[in-house]
Image: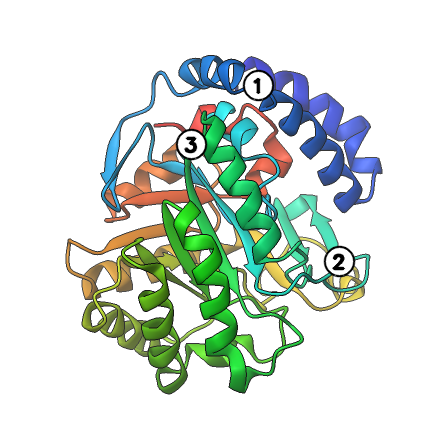
């Protein structure tokens, strides 16, 4: 445990835990944005936080550490520079939709401390692709950024039948400012979205987005709730379409094996479960995908990553990069440095 985590733990247990989780998130983002306000200071801090990380090559890029921040934390590219300064080797922003949208009604984010987990039904709340693309363009001009991935999803107001054009619009705006692009068809919080994982819908969608990406590495993010055979079919599609790879996995709709009392979990309602309970299934999906994907395809493993040993285990099983999110909320600003193996 580093100094930042030792300072953060009592703050979390006495102050932040008393706040609504989304309010606490916004408060944390203010600090992160302040850390990244000056590109020169952010670069200086970043050199210290990732100094002991192992440089890796993935997606045609060189990253200072294989560990990065998963999509969901910074939906609007507001804290990218500060998050890079904290030690994340890459930051995946979003999910961004073509149309701005407020997301689902609050409360929509819930802590399960006994399980080191979260339940969220945020609903892709974001400012829209046009606003986020302009912000990324400004950030690029001033520099000091980590590797930035952009995760795109379907606008809620757009019917599933029109999803291809909706994703294309986002890709057209955002790909020029992204180091890599991720098609999210696996969030449980947008009606009909997971149905896009069916091959007859997924192939034309990925084909269209690939054309808009114009050479920017393109990956697809899948759910942990898919059957193994369905995962293998998606892996075959990734190879056939010559995509860069797969991000595995998103949150789960399952609630098995939780320590938190069932009535408390039921009271939280619907949403995707993230954090430590996903570890076992995430590892299973990693094994299935690595066996199905040739070495040239990038595999980003996410779900239940908490410690540096978790990162090492994913890499040993064939992941090219590793991501986390929920552990950041529980462990605080020193977490990325601890996991920069």
Q: Quadrant of residue 296?
A: bottom left
Residue 29 vertical placement versus 130 (above, below): above
Q: CA distance from mark 1 to mark 3?
A: 14 Å
Helix, strand or loop at label 1? It is loop
Q: Could you say which is closer to the camera, residue 103 or residue 264? A: 103
For label 1, the crowd category at 10 Å Cα-Cα, with few meaning under 14, some 14 to 19 and many 20 or more, is some
Helix, strand or loop at label 2? It is loop
Q: CA distance from mark 3 to mark 2?
A: 29 Å
Q: Which is nearer the N-term, disc 3 or disc 2?
A: 2
Could you say where residue 202 lies in the image, as x and y percent from the top left?
38, 78
The residue singled out by tag 1 in the image is 38
Q: How is the image coloured?
A: rainbow
Q: Could you say which is closer to the camera, residue 212 or residue 58? A: 212
Could you say where residue 90 lies in the image, as x and y percent from the top left?
41, 37
The residue singled out by tag 2 in the image is 108
Can residue 159 be seen in this snapshot? yes
The circle on residue 146 is 3
Could you say where residue 338 lies in the image, as x and y percent from the top left?
45, 25
Total numbered labels placed on residues in the image: 3
- Position of residue 160 in the picture relative to residue 220 (left or right): right
Evaluate if marks 1 and 3 touch, with contact meaning CB atoms under 8 Å apart: no
Q: Could you say which is closer to the camera, residue 270 or residue 121? A: 121
Q: Residue at x 67, y 76 (%)?
A: 157
Q: Quadrant of the C terminus?
A: top left
Q: CA distance from mark 2 to mark 1?
A: 32 Å
């Amino acid at each position: 445990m580093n100094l930042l985590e030792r300072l953060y733990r009592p703050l979390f247990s006495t102050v932040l835990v008393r706040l609504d989780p989304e309010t606490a998130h916004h408060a944390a983002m203010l600090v992160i944005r302040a850390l990244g306000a000056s590109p020169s200071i952010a670069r200086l801090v970043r050199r210290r936080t990732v100094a002991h990380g192992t440089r890796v090559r993935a997606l045609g890029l060189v990253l200072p550490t294989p560990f990065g921040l998963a999509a969901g934390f910074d939906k609007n590219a507001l804290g990218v520079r500060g998050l890079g300064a904290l030690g994340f080797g890459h930051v995946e922003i979003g999910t961004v939709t073509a149309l701005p949208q407020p997301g689902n009604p609050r409360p929509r984010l819930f802590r399960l401390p006994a399980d080191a987990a979260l339940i969220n039904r945020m609903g892709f709340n974001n400012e829209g692709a046009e606003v986020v693309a302009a912000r990324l363009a400004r950030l690029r001009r001033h520099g000091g950024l980590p590797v930035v991935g952009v995760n795109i999803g379907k606008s809620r107001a757009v019917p599933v039948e029109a999803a291809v054009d909706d994703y294309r619009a986002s890709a057209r705006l955002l790909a020029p400012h992204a180091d890599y692009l991720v098609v999210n068809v696996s969030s449980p919080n947008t009606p009909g979205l997971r149905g896009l994982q069916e091959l007859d819908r997924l192939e034309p969608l990925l084909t269209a987005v690939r054309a808009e990406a114009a050479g920017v590495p393109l990956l697809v993010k899948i759910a942990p709730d898919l059957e193994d055979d369905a995962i293998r079919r998606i892996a075959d599609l990734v190879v056939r379409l010559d995509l860069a790879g797969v991000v595995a996995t998103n949150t789960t709709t399952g609630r098995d094996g939780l320590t938190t009392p069932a009535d408390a979990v039921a009271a939280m309602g619907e949403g995707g479960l993230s954090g430590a309970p996903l570890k076992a299934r995430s590892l299973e999906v990693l094994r299935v995908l690595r066996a199905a994907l040739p070495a040239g395809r990038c595999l980003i493993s996410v779900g239940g990553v908490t410690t540096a040993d978790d990162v090492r285990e994913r890499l040993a099983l064939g992941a090219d990069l590793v991501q986390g999110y929920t552990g950041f909320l529980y462990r605080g600003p020193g977490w990325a440095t601890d996991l920069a193996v």
